[in-house]
Image: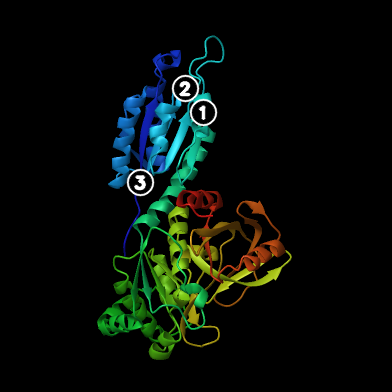
Amino acid sequence: MNSVVGAIRVGLVPLVRPLFRGARMGLAEASLEALKGLEVPFGFSLDYVSPPVGEAGEAHARAAEAGKRYEDGSLDLLLVQHVTFSSGDVIAPFLDLPMPLGLWALPEAATQGPLPQNALCGLNHGLSLPTARTIPVKWLYGNAEDSQFRARLGLTLRALRGRRALARGRILWVGGTAPGFSRLEALPDLPLRVDRAPLDDLFGAVDAIGDDDVSAALSTLDEPRGLELEALRRTVRLELAIERLADGYDGVALRCWPEVPERMGTMACAAFARLSDRGLALACEGDAAAVASMIAVAAVSGAPAITLDLSHAAEDGLLFWHCGNAARAWARAGETILTSHFNRGLPAVRDMRLEPGPVGGLRFLEGRRAAVYGGAVTGRADGYDGVSGWIGRLRWAGQEMSPAEFLAGVLNHRLPHHLVWGRGEAEAALIELCAWLGCR
């Protein structure tokens, strides 16, 4: 499997106009040290720090350096810091860079006497300048120790982890889509690679798995089950075959039926679930756009994402379900069981209920469009065989909605039936991710 984890690489360019007394108060130096103190807890590395910039020629030179680092993949985000006010000709070269950019203003060092910095006004001025940028500029205000600054920076770093995961991501699309699922054939306009492979590649990989490899994998299976161990042999063989095919990839979209159960006598669900435990994003029915959404959500949330169908609506929430392909990290109290598919009777699916808590979701659509939503898995105990859970406190792009309103949003916008979800409060970061990607 491919890996796109790692610290976000950040650059810093302090803008300091010598005319202001704040230029001689050591503010840039103190701010740099404070920012360095956030590297480990916030998961970024400060890889480029420019000398203070005070005039347009210096700005053009520093912008060229930062742009080159972005092009060669060694910089993910550039922070242009208003230590003092700076004029438009100093700010413009950075606005012209086709990379994620944050304009950051320090608070005034004093609130009486001669104005020390006028940095906030500089931020206001910089953001108001005309620009040909196609992606936004993030603004930040405060000292590195301030809670508002930390919250906004943390949100951006999470969003950029999703962006980088997509930029470096690779998906293997095996067999196309399942019969009748034509909506899933469309791919979003995203910066990731999608390779196609026929189903015969999967079955060839299955045939190449030795019996000893299957037995070894079965011997390490520590999950509760409602099936005899030998009944899982075909499922484990499929799991090992997908894992081999997925080498170098971040996700797999597989046409998981009808050919797989017909030819192998097993469902792909439990194989998907167990591979999800190991960090691979997988989607049923050949849904490559769902895999892309899962890769982004996992990078933002820091945990495996899942795809769920919207199966039932009630006044207090919506019941989401899938056959049984979710990572154990989602299981209520960690309780799962491997058992037979609910209507095919074949092995194997992972039966579990979703752990209560906040969730955020993202579904990439055709072109540069996306849906972002959120809510919370409730403690309601009823649900269907397979993976299921009730989600309430629903939101659509940050707007609170009743279950009926959320349902109407899904149906009126004609979303594909696979909705991708991530653990934790992820909705705001996912909205920002979409902005960095130019999605609407």
Point 36% across, 60% down: residue: 169
Which residue is outermost to the right? 315
Residue 216 x, y percent position in the rendering: 29, 77
* Residue 166's disc number: none
Q: Earlier in the sequence, mark 2 or mark 3?
A: 3
Label 3 neighbour load within 10 Å: few <14, some 14-19, many 20+? some
Mark 1 and mark 2 in contact (Cβ < 8 Å)?
yes
* Residue 125's disc number: 1
**Rendered view: 311 above or below 33:** below
From the image, tell me which residue sits under label 2: 85
* Residue 7's disc number: 3
Of the pair 331 and 439, the residue shown nearer to us: 439
Q: Is residue 140 visible in the rendered structure shown here? A: yes
Quadrant in the picture for residue 373: bottom right
**Residues at marks 3 and 1, CA–CA distance in whole angstroms:** 31 Å
Residue 166 x, y percent position in the rendering: 39, 57
Label 2 neighbour load within 10 Å: few <14, some 14-19, many 20+? many
| Tag 3 secondary structure | loop
Q: Nearer the viewer, mark 3 or mark 1?
A: 1
Residue 97 x, y percent position in the rendering: 38, 40
Of the pair 329 and 427, the residue shown nearer to us: 427
**Residues at marks 2 and 3, CA–CA distance in whole angstroms:** 31 Å
- The amino acid at mark 1 is His
Lateral position of residue 46 relative to residue 42, left or right = left
Label 1 neighbour load within 10 Å: few <14, some 14-19, many 20+? some
